[in-house]
Image: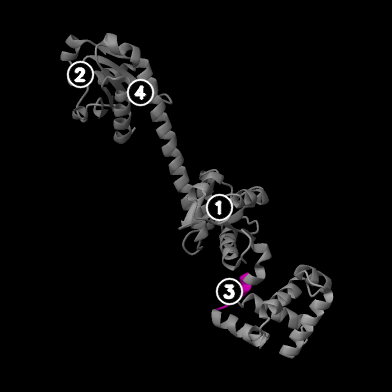
Amino acid sequence: MTAELAQEIAAETSRIVGFNVLVTDRDGIVIGSGDPARVGSLHEASVEVMRTLEPAWHDAEQARRLRGVRPGMTLPIVVEGEALGTVGITGSPRQVRRFGLLVQRHTEILVREATLLRSRLLRDRAVSDLVRDIVSFDPDVVSARAVERRAADLGLDLGRPRTAVVIDSADARAVRSVFSEPTEIATGRFVVLHHGDTAALAHRLAELSPDVHIGLSDPAVGVAALHEACRDAADALTVAQPGRCVHPIAELRVPQLLASAGPHARNRFAAVTLGPLPAEPDWPALKSTLVAWGASGFNLVRAAEALHVHRNTLVYRLDKITDLVGRPVKDPAVGLAMYLGCLVTP
């Protein structure tokens, strides 16, 4: 029991019952009181109460014979079988007797809740540190076995498949309401190593706000694989196309690969493969045509359906692209190169 908690309990309880309440530690030293002047003094009656763990009453005559004691009642504070100190109520024993058990139970409940909260906060901090270490894992700095042991101490089995979930959101409270142990790795960005139904989780996250964006990795097992999964989920947010809030990396492997190349390499690739196309007045339509053509596996029917155009319109556009670049876009090798060029072109 901390001095801060003891003072909070004493001040609040004094206000409620209308009598001064003080709290001592195991040695009978006052660590909280409705009368701040008594903090730090010895409350001699508490020493005997701690020894017997029985309540004690003191009238004016008895109190005069004890150091730092005024008329009233003193009771032990016992939480989970451990005596932590005492709580005393100042006043005529006849007046305060009816409050004794109430104040004792109230104090024990508050101490128990504070202990549980502190334990939970310590565990949350340990889990956050663990996830951060996985995000930044370097086998030359720390062994995977050491990280796994820490996870096991926290009741987390890294041998079970987990999906790295990286969430970009300005609403930290909403994100934390979904998870028991999210980890904030940057301002507005959270990472979670999730074991369970990822689709249901993504649905719940998507309902939080239209501004929430979620990157999902493939399932991974073990520290090294989870480290890569965290990178994948973060990459999914980086290369994601607008219009959606959930971005599985499994659907973004090609953009991820392209993003790994430097800007110069990407720009050079796009310039060589696309040639004069970006300068054309109808470039947006030509670009969407090339993207649909590549994404459909160079299938006319599927590409036309994706574009919501007639098949003849698609053929006309493909022929126009072929004439402009001087290479047959219906050739899969050419079509693939131009598809990739579009992906790296704004």
Q: Which of marks 4 and 1 is in front?
A: 1
Sequence-first disc among 4 and 1: 4
Residue under circle 4? 77
Label 1: few (<14), some or many (≥20) within 10 Å? Answer: many
User: In this image, 335 relative to 160: left or right?
Assistant: right
Q: Is residue 103 visible?
A: yes
Q: Which of the marked residues, 1 or 2, is nearer the chain's N terminus?
A: 2
Disc 1 element: strand
**To which quarter of the image does residue 342 belong?**
bottom right
Structural crowding at the residue carrying mark 4, measured as other residues with C-alpha within 10 Å and reported as few (<14), some (14–19) or many (≥20): many
Q: Position of residue 245 (x, y in %)?
A: 61, 58
CA gap between label 1 and label 2 equals: 54 Å
Residue topped by disc 1: 192
Q: Residue 342, relative to residue 203: is it above or below?
A: below
- Name the kind of residue labelled 3 in the image: Ser
SS at mark 4? strand
Q: In this view, does 262 lie above or below 97?
A: below
Q: What residue sits 15% from the left and 14% below the top?
A: 64
Label 4 vs label 1: CA separation?
39 Å
Disc nearer the start of the sequence (3/4): 4
The quarter of the picture where residue 118 lies is top left
Q: Residue at x 66, y 83 (%)?
A: 281
* Residue type beneath disc 2: Val
Residue 294 screen position, x and y as percent: 74, 74
Image quarter where the C terminus lies is bottom right
Instruction: Give the x, y percent position of residue 110.
Output: 39, 29
Magenta stretch, residue numbers: 256-262
